[in-house]
């Protein structure tokens, strides 16, 4: 079991309140992702749940038990750090065994679990090496191995992939997702990368300045962003925002339309503009369009190869029914 | 052509000469001390620089009966070892707390500790003597010397350990907390193994400071707990100018520490540069 509930949790550093009163429930077995720009308080929130930071006020409950005053070592949670935080003086085997040794698991059982974890994480050949002799990806796997052998109530991941290169990141992302489907243990994952959030999460928690902006499933956030911040943060490339007369036509202060919801047409589009930069990815082409009279730049995603280049005139048609409307405070209009 | 600094003639020849010059300057008094220890007392008092003489081992052979060398040496070992052990016993948890759970006052506390070294020892000589002799009755005991040596070195010990501990990433300690260790476990399982080199150089330096300490060891002892410093100091005048014997005793007093330092050179240099170079 691993149901985690935060009740009116706040955190102050000195006189600065970094987490204003916050309520959140993470259900047992859920993969929750905290996402937001740097400094939004997502790591602090994770550390509060871990017990590595003290809450200023409010309550943290794990499976109904108040753990607010309980030390990190007694909360039954496992954490994977951005910097891996392996014990450099111990071999991989000893690193993985460490939490079990502390918990007094008997040696035969330890050995069994180490073997199982090493097999699952492709570490069998490296068990007798020290962390210093491993690559970044292998180190992160050891950190994950150290977490899973404990059979924790929940896993906490603090930006675990941001020190890895892009290709490895994608691979590890999939491994962690698979691990979650297999173990069905609650996982809380902190990242600033909305792609990681979208691809892994059951539930995304978007944070800004310590406030929860929106909680929902990835597609829920994609389809119904509750405000301009979430609209701009979720989705890649970023949603286009248009103000003024064009927005007025939709009875809104601002309208948002995603790059993939604008079609490139041969002529007589609703909008026209000049191509600034064309990014040809093969599978898609991204156009950064200027001089539309709508916004400084419109980003457009056209599927496949479209042979327009810098300076060419481009004709665009927004799709109906996928335009997001926001009021002057940035809140969604239904 | 790339611009590079040219080696000057002074650089290639001057530097080694200068280095040797400075080395000899520092080494000569020690050399002279050792040399004198092999002279008879008669040779030793001669005012000229006497390099040729009939060497004798007499000073060393008679050391035990003349000066009861071993009693002083054992006292030196006991007080230095225990003072160092206690300093680490107190210093490791203190430095750990300040390095990993700093409060707003941690810097002030560290400065305050260092400030205790600014008090001239002579200023508290009378209260110390009075207190230990008449009030506590621990004058001239091992206990007193261990306590004093431990306390006067504690600021340095804590500062050095603090600097070493600071270099350990906080996440490793936090990983330990998540993995279920308590505070003692963090120190024993993670901190000490990781900072072992730093702790060893701190211990070594502390031991050397304790061994060499003369002000308090001379003034707070008479016979029972007197250390080698007291032996050297005490035999300066009363028996006249027995320079040969005195040199032998002095050599035997600094010898152990020089040998210890020689074997631990690497640790010592690391300790003295305070982790300035990684």
Image (tube, grey):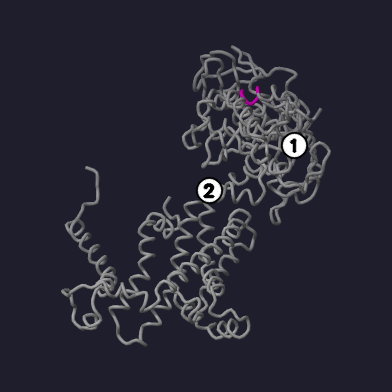
Dot 1: few (<14), some (14–19), or many (≥20) neighbours within 10 Å? Answer: some
Q: Position of residue A150 (x, y in %)?
A: 67, 34
Using residue B65 as the reference point, say whether residue A78 is left or right of it. right
Magenta stretch: give its range. Answer: A174-178
Q: Quadrant of residue A116?
A: top right
Residue pictured at 19% horizontal, 78% vertical: B49
Give the chain letter at badge 2: B
Q: Nearer the viewer, residue A324 or B236?
A: B236
Residue pictured at 64% horizontal, 61% vertical: B104
Using residue A20 as the reference point, say whether residue A240 is left or right of it. left
Residue B139 is one of the magenta-drawn residues:
no
- Disc 1 target residue: A213
Dot 2: few (<14), some (14–19), or many (≥20) neighbours within 10 Å? Answer: some
Q: CA distance from mark 2 to mark 1?
A: 44 Å
Residue pictured at 72% horizontal, 47% vertical: A71
Q: Does residue A298 appear in the picture of this structure?
A: no
- Give SS at disc 2: helix
């Amino acid at each position: 079991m691993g149901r985690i509930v935060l009740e009116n949790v706040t955190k102050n550093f000195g006189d600065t309140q970094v987490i204003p009163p916050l309520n959140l429930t993470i259900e047992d077995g859920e993969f929750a992702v905290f996402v937001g720009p740097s400094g939004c308080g997502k790591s602090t929130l994770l550390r509060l749940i871990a017990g590595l930071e003290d809450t200023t006020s409010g309550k943290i409950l794990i499976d109904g038990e108040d753990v607010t005053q309980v030390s990190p070592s007694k909360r039954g949670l496992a954490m994977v750090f951005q910097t891996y935080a392996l014990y450099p003086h111990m071999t991989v085997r000893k690193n993985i065994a460490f939490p079990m040794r502390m918990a007094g698991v008997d040696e035969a059982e330890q050995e069994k679990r180490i073997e199982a974890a090493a097999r699952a994480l492709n570490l069998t050949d490296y068990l007798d090496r020290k962390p210093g002799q491993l690559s970044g990806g292998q180190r992160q796997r050891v950190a994950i191995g150290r977490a899973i052998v404990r059979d924790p109530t929940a896993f906490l991941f603090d930006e675990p992939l941001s020190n890895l290169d892009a290709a490895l990141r994608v691979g590890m992302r999939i491994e962690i997702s698979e691990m979650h489907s297999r173990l069905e243990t609650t996982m809380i994952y902190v990242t600033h990368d909305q792609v990681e959030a979208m691809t892994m999460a059951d539930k995304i928690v978007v944070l800004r300045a310590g406030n929860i902006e929106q909680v929902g499933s990835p597609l829920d956030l994609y389809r119904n962003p509750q405000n301009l911040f979430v609209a701009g943060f979720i989705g890649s490339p970023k949603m286009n925002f248009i103000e003024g007369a064009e927005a007025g036509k939709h009875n809104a202060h601002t309208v948002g339309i995603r790059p993939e919801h604008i079609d490139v047409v041969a002529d007589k589009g609703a909008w026209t503009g000049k191509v600034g930069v064309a990014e040809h990815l093969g599978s898609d082409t991204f156009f950064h369009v200027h001089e539309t009279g709508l916004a400084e730049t419109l980003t457009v995603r056209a599927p496949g190869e479209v042979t327009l280049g810098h300076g060419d005139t481009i004709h665009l048609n927004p799709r109906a029914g996928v335009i997001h409307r926001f009021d002057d405070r940035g809140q969604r209009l239904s | 052509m790339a611009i590079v600094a040219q080696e000057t003639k002074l650089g290639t020849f001057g530097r080694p000469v200068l280095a040797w010059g400075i080395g000899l300057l520092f080494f000569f008094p020690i050399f002279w001390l050792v040399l004198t220890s092999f002279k008879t007392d008669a040779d030793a008092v001669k005012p000229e620089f006497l390099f040729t003489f009939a060497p004798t081992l007499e000073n060393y052979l008679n050391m035990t009966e003349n000066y009861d060398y071993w009693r002083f040496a054992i006292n030196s070992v006991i007080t230095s070892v225990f003072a160092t052990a206690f300093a680490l016993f107190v210093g490791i948890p203190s430095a750990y707390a300040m390095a990993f759970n700093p409060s707003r006052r941690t810097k002030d506390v560290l400065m305050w500790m260092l400030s205790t070294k600014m008090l001239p020892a002579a200023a508290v000589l009378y209260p110390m003597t009075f207190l230990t002799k008449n009030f506590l009755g621990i004058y001239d005991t091992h206990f007193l010397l261990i306590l004093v040596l431990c306390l006067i070195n504690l600021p340095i010990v804590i500062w050095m350990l603090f600097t070493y501990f600071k270099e350990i990433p906080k996440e490793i300690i936090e990983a330990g907390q998540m993995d279920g260790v308590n505070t003692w476990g963090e120190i024993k399982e993670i901190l000490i193994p990781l900072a072992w080199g730093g702790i060893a150089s701190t211990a070594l330096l502390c031991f050397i400071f304790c061994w060499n300490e003369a002000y308090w060891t001379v003034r707070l002892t008479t016979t029972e707990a007197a250390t080698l410093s007291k032996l050297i100091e005490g035999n300066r005048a009363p028996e006249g100018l027995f320079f040969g014997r005195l040199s032998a005793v002095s050599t035997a007093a600094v010898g152990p520490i020089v040998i210890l330092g020689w074997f631990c050179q690497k640790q010592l240099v690391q300790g003295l540069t305070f982790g300035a170079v990684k």
